[in-house]
Image (tube, grey):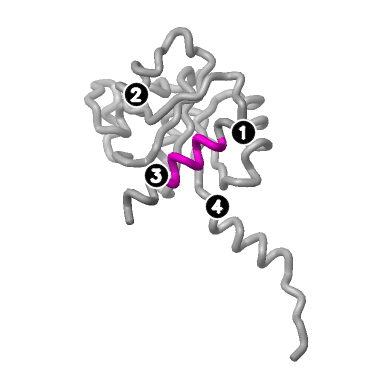
Amino acid sequence: MALRKISGRTEDKARLAQRPRVLYVEDEDTNWEVAEHALRGGYDLMRARNAQETFAALERERFDLVLMDIQLSGSDLSGIDITKVLRGMPLARAATYDGVRLPTTPIVFVTAYGSLYSREHLLAAGGTDMVAKPVSFPAMSLLMSRLIARRVQATL
């Protein structure tokens, strides 16, 4: 029996299909590029820059976790407001985004404003956890893996 060489492309496609899908809501290009570089080996990342892109992505695709920046320049909603809508909390000015809900998908706030927003405040707004900028990507990746594993176990 002859051995066949398996194409690297096939292996790459299979590996990509198994990686958790993460939506990162981030308006700053530099922050996105650093995160994408640090996390691309373990996660299938997609970016949204504002509320409109976030809800459009969530209508089209399923994600295992959402990373959420708080201050989103050029967005009609902040990351906190987006999260409240996704969790089904009332928010009058968000009526145009009423169709998408993420009751169990982990949402991790990634913020440089840790001194302005306590962890308790962000959890009350629907977040699952928070990570302060500048980000320690090994610690954030560990948190992401734990949250995704916990969600998978809850569905079994």
Query: Which is the main secondary structure of the residues drawn in magenta?
Result: helix
x and y percentages locating residue 131 in the rendered image:
50, 24
Q: Which residue is mark 3?
A: 150
Q: Which mark is residue 19?
A: 4
x and y percentages locating residue 12 in the rendered image:
66, 60
User: From mark 4 to mark 1, how far is it between C-alphas?
Assistant: 17 Å
User: From mark 4 to mark 2, how far is it between C-alphas?
Assistant: 26 Å
Q: Which residue is mark 2?
A: 123
Against 58, is 79 above or below? Answer: above
User: From mark 3 to mark 2, how far is it between C-alphas?
Assistant: 17 Å
Q: Residue furthest bottom?
A: 1
Q: Which residues are magenta?
A: 141-149
Q: Quadrant of residue 95?
A: top left
- For badge 1, the amino acid type reads Pro
User: From mark 3 to mark 1, how far is it between C-alphas?
Assistant: 18 Å
Q: Label 2 neighbourhood size at 10 Å, few (<14), some (14-19), many (20+)? A: some
- For badge 4, the amino acid type reads Arg
Image point 44% across, 30% down: which residue?
108
Q: Earlier in the sequence, mark 4 or mark 3?
A: 4
Rendered-image quadrant of the C terminus: bottom left
Image point 61% across, 58% down: which residue?
15
Which-is-in-front pick, marks 3 and 2?
3
Against 60, is 131 above or below? Answer: above
Q: Earlier in the sequence, mark 1 or mark 2?
A: 2
The mark total stands at: 4
- For badge 2, the amino acid type reads Leu
Q: Marks 4 and 2: CB-CB under 8 Å?
A: no
Image point 61% across, 31% down: which residue?
137
Q: Earlier in the sequence, mark 4 or mark 1?
A: 4
Q: Marks 3 and 2: CB-CB under 8 Å?
A: no
Against 113, is 24 above or below? Answer: below
